[in-house]
């Protein structure tokens, strides 16, 4: 009996010990879960139900001088899902009654509302069926997104992002540039990316076990910041006119490419910078000419030809080495001791021309005879002060030539002569426009520019260019050259151009040979006209250039486009007509 009692007590003790041990294990595990691992487990639990979302900072706009948007950002929506949650559900699917909706029915309705493809959606889901993220359709506009949202599919989610649009399309595509999948690719988008780009923020929301977002669970973890607004000096209406005029003329002339610029004389602001061909930033792939991705007016170098002669004439007068009526005996050709020869574009007997007549007839021989009164260094210095041989200081634009020529000319004897009629030196269309802005502005050069600055989201203006003017030649020298250039229109190389009724025009033509590497100069030409109006008080400078025209290889072919564009400028800005006769000097003696 005693032994039986002892055995019973032993079993009881063993059971009690086992129970106490088991309770101890549970207590220890409970403490471990609720105290020791509480923070990490809570965080792990949160991660399983908290969904991070990027908040995109809106990229800033690019606007013209009147605030018209040239580039803007609009909301677009990507539709995502968690493949592991994709299943049949009860819902209206955009209808009026609740019903059982299969996955196939949901995807079919989603494709119809979004314009997406069912097969593509299924492939995306099947790629990793146990994952929490997959794209179903991308880039929906607001209208299509609202149609998708109205379906009420519980396992789809939105991902909002900004998409770039260009309201003026190809009209200003050469200036704005465009965005690509890797960010800014060209133009002002690229040059001012730091100012335009917004900074992204983030938020999280909690999702229940059924995959539906929990109301009121959204928490912003980082605020997004919008980009700045880039303000340009471009007049988008005039830009459109310039692009249309240029494209029409280039096609008529069968030119390989062409440029046009319009400059406000008193401010140095570029009101239009047109290129042919040009790119539509809304459809970049449609442009096969990679050279059209930017602006040739800013990036393409060429030998300017006779448009440079106005700068040589101004330097001569400024130095007191010549005057509008200075006399020269001008044969058709001229030979030099080193064996070089130059000649005028058309044969003529030896003529008695003044400096005015030399500009009027665009005589290569004549300008070199008088221009040689200046040293090579003097001429080089003046060209540099006019804006040649160095980058455009007030223009930030990708692809501009460095043009770092140093402080002294590195010319051989022939180039020293040829440079006076624009051969053997390189310029851009913008630099030629700068020469004529300087002459039109009483000899004061204002760096040409087409960006005013960038206004940041907090109202500060940054990236404003330095447009301090500098004197290049005296006001008297500039005025005399401007007056002489009126003879080019009234009786010189532009005499065939129909006058612009009521206005005195001062202009110069250029017909430059195109170098073909070691072969020298070939038969191709670059033709141009640069001029200002009204000549007695210039307000605007217009330039046009045509590369390798086939229908007319002379500068006379460029004249109609110059006349049309200048007429549009004078009319648009309501410039008062001239009240005096064109001032002319004797061209011969």
Image (cartoon, rainbow, N blue to C red):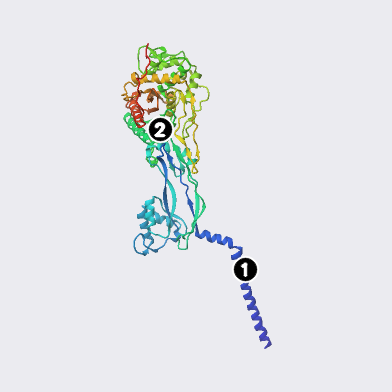
| Quadrant, the C terminus | top left
Instruction: Please state the horizontal and vertical placement of residue 113, each as a whole percent of the image.
Output: 36, 54
Relative vertical location of residue 402 with respect to residue 154 in this rendering, above or below? above
Q: Residue furthest right?
A: 2
Can you see residue 1? yes
Cα–Cα gap, marks 1 and 2: 79 Å
**Which of the 4 quarters of the picture holds residue 546?**
top left
Instruction: Please state the horizontal and vertical placement of residue 32, each as a whole percent of the image.
Output: 61, 65
| Quadrant, the N terminus | bottom right
Number of the label disc, if any, that sits on residue 28 = 1
Relative vertical location of residue 102 with respect to residue 195 in this rendering, above or below? below
Q: Residue at x 41, y 62 (%)?
A: 87
Relative vertical location of residue 259 with respect to residue 126 in this rendering, above or below? above
Relative vertical location of residue 510 with respect to residue 116 in this rendering, above or below? above
Q: Which residue is mark 2?
A: 271
Sooner in the amino-acid sequence: mark 1 or mark 2: 1
Q: Secondary structure at mark 1?
A: helix
Q: Residue at x 44, y 47 (%)?
A: 162
């Amino acid at each position: 009996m005693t032994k039986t009692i002892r055995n019973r007590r032993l079993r009881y003790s063993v059971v009690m010990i086992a129970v106490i041990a088991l309770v101890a294990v549970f207590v220890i595990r409970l403490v471990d879960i609720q105290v020791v691992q509480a923070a990490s487990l809570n965080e792990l639990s949160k991660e399983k139900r908290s969904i991070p979302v990027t908040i995109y900072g809106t990229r800033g706009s690019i606007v013209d001088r009147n605030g018209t948007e040239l580039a803007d950002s609009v909301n677009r929506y990507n539709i995502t899902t968690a493949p592991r949650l994709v299943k049949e559900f009860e819902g209206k699917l955009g209808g009026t009654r609740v019903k059982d909706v299969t996955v196939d029915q949901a995807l079919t309705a989603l494709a119809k509302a979004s314009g997406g493809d069912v097969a593509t959606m299924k492939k995306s889901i099947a790629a990793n069926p146990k994952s929490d993220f997959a794209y179903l359709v991308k880039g929906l506009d607001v209208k299509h997104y609202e149609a998708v949202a109205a379906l009420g599919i519980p396992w789809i989610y939105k991902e909002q992002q900004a998409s770039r649009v260009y309201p003026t399309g190809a009209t200003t595509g050469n200036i704005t540039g465009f965005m690509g999948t890797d960010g800014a690719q060209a133009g002002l988008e690229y040059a001012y990316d730091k100012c335009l780009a917004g900074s992204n923020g983030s938020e999280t929301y909690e999702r229940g076990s059924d995959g539906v977002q929990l109301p009121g669970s959204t928490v912003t973890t980082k605020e997004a910041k919008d980009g700045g607004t880039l303000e340009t000096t471009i007049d988008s209406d005039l830009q459109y006119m310039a692009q249309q005029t240029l494209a029409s003329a280039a096609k008529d002339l069968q030119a390989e490419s062409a440029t046009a610029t319009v400059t406000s004389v008193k401010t140095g602001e570029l009101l239009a910078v047109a290129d042919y061909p040009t790119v539509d930033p809304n459809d970049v792939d449609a442009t096969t000419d990679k050279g059209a991705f930017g602006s040739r007016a800013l990036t393409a170098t060429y030998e300017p030809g006779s448009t440079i002669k106005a700068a040589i004439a101004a330097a001569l007068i400024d130095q007191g080495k010549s005057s509008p009526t200075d006399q020269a005996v001008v044969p058709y050709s001229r030979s030099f001791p080193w064996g070089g020869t130059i000649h005028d574009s058309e044969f003529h007997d030896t003529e008695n021309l003044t400096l005015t007549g030399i500009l009027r007839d665009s005589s290569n021989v004549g300008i070199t005879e008088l221009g040689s009164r200046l040293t090579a260094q003097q001429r080089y210095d003046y060209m540099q002060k006019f804006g040649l041989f160095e980058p455009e200081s007030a223009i930030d634009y990708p692809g501009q030539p460095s043009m770092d020529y140093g402080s002294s000319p590195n010319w051989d004897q022939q180039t020293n002569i040829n440079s006076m009629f624009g051969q053997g030196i390189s310029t851009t269309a913008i630099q030629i426009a700068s020469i004529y802005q300087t002459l039109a502005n009483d000899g004061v050069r204002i760096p040409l520019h087409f960006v005013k600055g960038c206004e940041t989201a907090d109202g500060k203006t940054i990236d404003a260019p330095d447009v301090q003017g500098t004197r290049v030649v005296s006001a008297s020298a500039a005025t005399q050259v401007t007056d002489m250039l009126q003879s080019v229109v009234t009786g010189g190389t532009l005499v065939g151009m129909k006058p612009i009724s009521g206005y005195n025009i001062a202009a110069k033509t250029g017909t430059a040979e195109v170098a073909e590497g070691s072969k020298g100069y070939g038969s191709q030409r670059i033709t141009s006209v640069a001029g200002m109006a009204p000549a007695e008080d210039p307000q605007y400078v217009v330039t046009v250039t045509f590369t390798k025209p086939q229908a007319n290889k002379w500068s006379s072919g460029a004249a109609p486009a110059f006349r049309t564009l200048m007429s549009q400028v004078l009319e648009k800005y309501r410039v008062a007509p001239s009240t005096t006769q064109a001032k002319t000097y004797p061209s011969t003696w």
